Amino acid sequence: MDAAGGEQLSLAAVRDALVRLEDSVVFALIERAKHRRNAPAYAPAAAAGGRSLVEFFVREAETGHYQKPEDVPFFPQDLPSPLFPSKYSAKVLHPSASLVTVNDAIWKMYFNELLPLFTVDGDDGSYAETVALDFVCLQVISRRIHIGKYVAEVKFKDAPQDYSPLIQAKDSNSLMNLLTFKAVEEKVKKRAEKKARTFGQNVTLEDTAGKQEGTAGDSGCKVDPKVLSKLYDQWVMPLTKDVEVEYLLRRLE
Ligand SMILES: C=C(O[C@@H]1C=C(C(=O)O)C=C[C@H]1O)C(=O)O
């Protein structure tokens, strides 16, 4: 993971990368929210061989390059082999990192739970753009969550004596407790909400001093800031921790 400093991985560096990715998550949602829900893009379509337009689009787009461990395809079965040898080989992560994916859960969460929370019901007809923007959202959320592999690796390296017995005992619950930092999670939630409030406000040249703090102006935000705290609280952080646990369970193989 470039942003986390390559081989000199530290928990602080990985957390910095996660903080930076929050910006991309917020902006991806803001872009998608410009369009209506556009339900026909998610129903099976004859023109897409019976698949939904979004599935058709994502499958096509994924034939690009997936080389970094945190970039995990949604439809791995149908991908051609990479043309070039990967320069992101297992220098930092344990080789079984590539087996860890929660993309099925991310896909279901995004379409069934998240999309209805931040898009307006209705149909504006621009399905191609809509599914492209969905893919941007899915990819950035997925990358964020799969960076959990690096988080787990540094936590393990920092305290192998604590993690190893739990890994050997396949004790997922105790691993989950050991890698959880509630105070960090609280900050992540609050910051994601604040970023949505900051990045999603309508910037005007009039004097709006005093009106920007708090939740009074949230109705004017491009994406409801509360959706961001919910996204992180209920889905992004729990799935990141699932990735951490799954990675750790294979760490001594
Ligand atoms: C990612 C970490 O592991 C856990 C998951 C977090 C997250 O997804 O943001 C935050 C704190 C930890 O409970 C971390 O420690 O930074």
Image (spheres, rainbow, N blue to C red):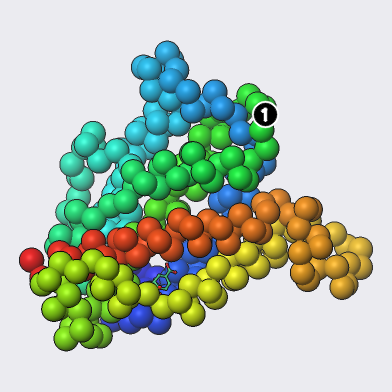
What amino acid type is highlighted by mark number 1?
Gly
Q: Position of residue 2 (x, y in %)?
A: 35, 69
Quadrant containing the N terminus is bottom left
Q: Position of residue 132 (x, y in %)?
A: 50, 37
Residue at 38% across, 58% down:
239
Q: Residue at x 42, y 13 (%)?
A: 46
Q: Decide which of 246, 70 is in the foreground and name it.
A: 246
**Which residue, as the protein is rendered here, is positioned at the far right?**
206
Q: Characterize the local packing of mark 1: few (<14), some (14-19) or many (20 or more) Cα atoms within 10 angstroms.
A: few
In the image, 105: left or right of 231?
left
In the image, 179 versus 222, the foreground residue is: 179
On the rendered structure, is 178 left or right of 97? right
Quadrant field for ligand 1: bottom left
Q: Position of residue 170 (x, y in %)?
A: 15, 67
| Residue highlighted by disc 1 | 122
Looking at the rendered image, the quarter that the C terminus falls into is bottom left
Between 165 and 38, the one lying in front of the other is: 165
Q: Quadrant of residue 147?
A: bottom left
- Camera-nearest residue between 147 and 189: 189
Picture coordinates of residue 82, whole percent (x, y): 20, 45
Give me the residue at 12% from left, 71% from top.
169
For the question of whether residue 201 can be seen, the reply is yes
* Outermost top residue: 46
Against 156, is 207 above or below? above
Q: Secondary structure at mark 1?
A: loop
